[in-house]
Each structure stands twice: as structure tokens, then as C-alpha cells.
Amino acid sequence: SVGATVVMADVRLADGSRLPHWSLQIDVALGTLLISVVNAASLREHIDLANLYLFVALFAVLYLPLRSALAHIAVAGATYAVVLGLGPASVEP
């Protein structure tokens, strides 16, 4: 996942001014997917990476139209719900 993040950042840095504005939507979606994969993999070691979803929400609100930002925040919430559903069951509420 670190390699994918580096590739995404390199593409954005190399051709960022030439990329269409909608490509930010793809970047945010891929970021959410990468965060979810890493978060799901780290559940067994009890590492909490849920705070990374806040960066998705912050970026979306700052750089995307409101409807798109709200959609990305909803997708981030849904993917985190899936990650929590796949994780180990909690013995205490």
C-alpha cells in the first residue's frame, strides 16, 4: 500500500497541472480504499488507524465540491463500517 501511495503522489507531482479536476475524485477514492485495506490488515495487531479517515474528509471538504465531499465522507464511513464488521468481535461493549 505504501508503493501505491508513492505512485499516486509521483503521478500527481509530475503531471498535476495537466490532470483534469475530476482526477482528484479518483485520488480520494483510492486513498479511502488504501486506508481501508491497511486498517483491515492492522485489526489483528490492535493498531487503530481510523483517524486517517479524517484526512480523507478534510481533503474532500477543502478541495472538492460540497456534494462530492459529502459523498466521499459517506463512502469513507461505509468502508470503515465494513472494516469494523470484518474485525474481531469485541467482548466488552
Image (tube, rainbow, N blue to C red):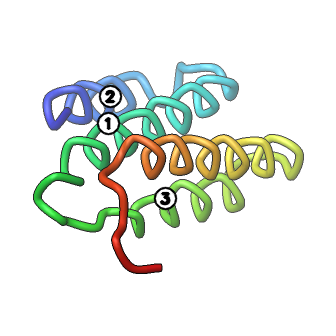
Disc with the residue nearer the chain's start (3 vs 1): 1
x and y percentages locating residue 91 in the rendered image? 34, 71
Is residue 78 or residue 62 the one in the foreground? 78
Report the number of discs. Answer: 3
x and y percentages locating residue 17 in the rendered image? 52, 29
Question: Mark 3: which amino acid?
Answer: Tyr
Q: Mark 3 points at which residue?
A: 53
Q: Name the residue under label 1.
A: 37
Kindly identify the residue that appears in the image at 66 percent across and 41 percent down.
75
Is residue 16 or residue 5 the one in the foreground? 5
Q: Give the CA distance from mark 2 to mark 3.
A: 18 Å
On the picture, is 21 further left or further right than 41? right
> Mark 2 near mark 3, Cβ–Cβ under 8 Å?
no
**Does residue 57 sit above or below 25 in this rendering?**
below
Badge 2 crowding class, 10 Å Cα cut-off, few under 14, some 14 to 19, many 20 or more, is some
Badge 1 crowding class, 10 Å Cα cut-off, few under 14, some 14 to 19, many 20 or more, is some
Q: Nearer the viewer, mark 2 or mark 3?
A: 3
Question: Mark 2: which amino acid?
Answer: Met
Q: Give the CA distance from mark 3 to mark 1.
A: 12 Å
Kindly identify the residue that appears in the image at 50 percent across and 32 percent down.
27
x and y percentages locating residue 56 in the rendered image? 53, 54
Q: Mark 2 points at which residue?
A: 8
**Does residue 63 sit above or below 90 in this rendering?**
above
Question: What secondary structure is marked by label 1?
Answer: helix
